[in-house]
Amino acid sequence: MSALLEIKNLHVSVADTEILKGLSLSVSAGEVHAIMGPNGSGKSTLSYVLAGRDGYEITNGDILLNGVSLKGMNPEDRAIAGLFLAFQYPLEIPGVTNMTFLKTSVNAVRRGRGEEEMDAASFLRFVREKAKALRLDDDMLKRPLNVGFSGGEKKRNEILQMSVLEPLMAILDETDSGLDIDALKTVAEGVNALRDTQRGMLVITHYQRLLDYIKPDIVHILAGGQIVKTGSAELALELEKSGYADYVGEVVA
Amino acid sequence: MSQAKQNIEKETVEKVQSLAGEKYKYGFSTDIDSEKAPKGLNEDIIRFISAKKEEPEWLLEWRLDAFERWLTMSEPEWAMVDYPQIDYQDLYYYSAPKSMDDRPETLDEVDPELLRTYEKLGIPLYEQEVLAGVKNRVAVDAVFDSVSVATTFREELATAGVIFCSFSEAVKEHPELVKKYLGTVVPKSDNYFTALNSAVFSDGSFVYIPPNTRCPMELSTYFRINEPNTGQFERTLLIADKGSYVSYLEGCTAPMRDENQLHAAVVELVALEDAEIKYSTVQNWYPGDEEGRGGIYNFVTKRGDCRENNAKISWTQVETGSAITWKYPSCILRGDNTVGEFYSIAIGNNYQQIDSGTKMIHLGKNTSSRIISKGISAGKSSNAYRGQVSIHRKADKARNFTQCDSLLIGDTCSAHTVPYIETKNPSAILEHEATTSKISDDQLFYCQQRGLDAEEAVSLIVNGFCKDVLQHLPMEFAVEAQKLVGISLEGSVG
Ligand SMILES: Nc1ncnc2c1ncn2[C@@H]1O[C@H](COP(=O)(O)OP(=O)(O)OP(=O)(O)O)[C@@H](O)[C@H]1O
Ligand SMILES: [Mg+2]
C-alpha cells in the first residue's frame, strides 16, 4: 500500500537559494509524524511547498498525495484534495467574519469535490459544536478573521478551521508556540479528536511538551534542509536533553 | 457514471460557463427601431426635444437659457481623469424606441422586445411577479435611452399620496411641483455638465412624498443606455415633504460597445423639515474592455438639500462601472440639526478612471455629516477620492467624521485622496482618517489554502473591506452588490 503523503528527494529553492536539499519522508494514513529542527532549517518552507505557495520552486524530487503528484497543482486544488496547513502566522482579513470565512471555505472545498453546499442552519450548528470543543467563544465566530485575536486565539482558530474542514492530510506548523498550558491541552485534544485511520498528520514543533499530549508515531529531525534522523517518540525526549548540536554538525560536514 | 454525479458535472460546467460569461453580463444590446433627433447640439435640437415631450413654454425657455450658458462654459479640468476631447456635435441627444411614440397605457401595449430586455436585466416590470416573489416590494421606473418605458405600482403608491412617475409625466401632471423645485438644488450653470443636462435632459424619475408619510415601498429607477453614439441626460427630482421618509435606488447598465458614450445626469433631492431620504446607487455602466476600449463617460451631479430643520439625506453608492466616473453626491445642511451621510464604494479595474467623493456644506447649527469612502483599485485603474467639508460661519457646533480607505490590488494601479476642509466656525469638530492597504500575496495564499480560488479570495477580501458601506444598502440589493463587487474585479489577480 502506498503512503498517504510521500515526499521524495525534495529540493526546493526560494529566491534562487536552495533551502530543502533532498528531503524524503512518507506518512501513511492513520499516522502522526512530528518534525523538529533548529530555526531556519526549512520546516516552514516544507509546509509552504506542500501547500503550493508561490515562489517555492521544486528543482528536483516530487510530492505525492494519495499517489498523485502535487507538482504544478494550485493551492486551492490541493486544499480540495484534502491537504490542510495550520499556519505558523495566521493571516488577518478585516471585515470578513470568522464564520463567513469558514463557510466560504467549506463550501469552496465541497464545490471543488462536486458535493452539495451545506445549508446555513446546519452549518451554524456544526461550527458551534466544533468551536465549543475548542473552548472558543461564540463571540470569536462573529469577529473579523484573526483581527485582534491574541496569538493563542489565532492558533486555536487554525485548529477550528481544521476540524471544520476535516482534511485528509494536515500539517501543523508550530501550532503550539504562543499557547499557554491550558490552551495547549485544548489544542492537543482538538488534534487528537481528529486522529483517524484515514488521516495523516505532520506536526512541526520545537517543544517536546506538545508531544506529551499529541503522541507521535514517528519523529523526524530536519536540519540543513534534510531529514537527518528519524525515530520513535523517544527521539524527541533525547533532543530535549542534548539539543541539535550533533545533527547540525553532521550536515555542515 | 451515476446519474447524480452526471448532474453535478453538468451543473459545474454550466456554472463555470455562466461565470465566464458574467464579466459584463449586461453587455447585450436590444435591436429596436428608434426615433432620434438629428446629430449635434443647437437650439433646434432643444426645441425638438421639448416638443417631443409636449413641454410648456416655461420649460423650453429654461432649457434654452441653460444652453446659452453652456455655450460660454468649458469642461472642468481639475479632476484626475484623462480622456480625448469630446465632440459634442457628433452625438445624438435624443433617442426613443418608436413603439413608445403612442404612449402605451399598460405593459401589454409595450413592445415585447423592450420587455424582454428588462427581463434579461432582471428588472421586475410585472407587479404580480414582484408580489409573488419577494417579501420586499420595489416599485420601478424603467428608463430606456431618452424615455421612461414603464413605472410600476403607481396606483398603490398614489393611495398613499406618493407621486412616482417619469420626469416627463411630472411636467404634465404636476407642473407646480416641478416648477417649484427644479433647479433649486443644482442650479443650471452649476457646472459644465449640469448646464448641458439642463439644456437637453430627456427623462428620469420624479418623486414626491407628502407630509408625514412613510413611502410604503422601495422606489427605484433603472437606467439603460441602448443606442450607440447617444448621450443619456437624465434628470431626477425627489422631494420629501415634512416628516416623510423614502428609500430610493437607482441602477444603470449599458451594452458593450467599442466607442465611448456620454452620460451626464443631474439628481436633485429636497428634504423638508424632519424628512429623511435614503438614496442608493448601484452604478454598473459598461466599463470598457481589458484594453480600455469603450465604456461610459459618467459625468454626474447629485446634490441633496436638507432645506429645513432636522432633515436627513443619506447617499450610498456602489460604483463599479463606467470608463470614467466624475461624481460627487453632496449634501447642503441648511436647516439646524440636519444630517448628511455619504457611503461609497468605488471600484476601478483595467483602465477605469474614477474621481469621486462628496461635499458636505454645513450652514445650519448642530449639523453633522459622516463620510465613509472605500476605494478599490486594480489593473491599470486610477481611483481618486475628492471630498470637501465646509463649515460656514453660522454653523455652530458642526461635526464631521470622514474615513477614507483605499485598497490596492497589484502594482499598476493608483489611489489618491484629496480632502478639502474649510472651517469658518471655531466650534466645529472634525475628524479625518485615511488608510491605504494592499491585498497581500500572503492573504491570497491563506484563502487559497482554504479552498478559495484567487478570484473568490479577492472578492471575499474586498467585500470585507467594503462591509461598512455595503450594510447601508437596502437589504434586497446588498446581496446583488456583493456579487457585483466580485465580478467587477475578475481578472485582477493571477
Ligand atoms: N523568501 C525567502 N527568501 C530568502 N530566504 C528565505 C525565504 N524564505 C525562507 N528563507 C530562508 O529559508 C530558511 C528556512 O526558513 P524556514 O522558515 O523554512 O525555517 P523554519 O525551520 O521554519 O524556522 P523556524 O523554526 O524559525 O520557524 C531560512 O534560512 C530562511 O531565511
Ligand atoms: Mg517556521
Image: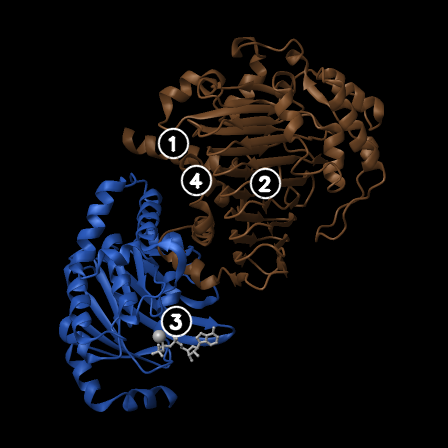
Chain colours: A blue, B brown
Judge by depth and name the residue closer to the eye, B432 or B405.
B432
Specify the subunit that label 1 lies on.
B
Q: Which residue is drawn at 64% across and 31% down?
A: B181
Q: Name the residue under label 1.
A: B10
Q: Mark 4 points at which residue?
A: B478
Alpha carbon separation for disc pair 3 and 1: 39 Å
Could you tell me which secondary element the residue under label 4 belongs to? helix
Q: Could you tell me the amino acid type at mark 4? A: Ala
In this rendering, the answer to whether A225 lies above or below B42 is below
Q: Earlier along the polypeptide chain: callout 4 or callout 2? A: 2
Q: Are dots 3 and 4 in contact, CB under 8 Å?
A: no
Q: Name the residue under label 2.
A: B304
Alpha carbon separation for disc pair 1 and 2: 50 Å
Q: Which mark is residue A45?
A: 3
In this rendering, the answer to whether B346 lies above or below A6 is above
Q: Is mark 3 within 8 Å of ligand 1?
A: yes
Res. B225 visible in picture: no
Whether labels 3 and 1 belong to a single chain: the reply is: no
Alpha carbon separation for disc pair 3 and 4: 41 Å
Mark 1 Cα shell of 10 Å, populated few (<14), some (14-19), many (≥20): few
In this rendering, the answer to whether B299 lies above or below B434 is above
Q: Could you tell me the amino acid type at mark 3? A: Thr
Q: Earlier along the polypeptide chain: callout 1 or callout 4? A: 1
Q: Earlier along the polypeptide chain: callout 1 or callout 2? A: 1
The quadrant of the picture occupied by the N terminus of chain A is bottom left
Residue A222: percent from left, percent from top: 31, 78
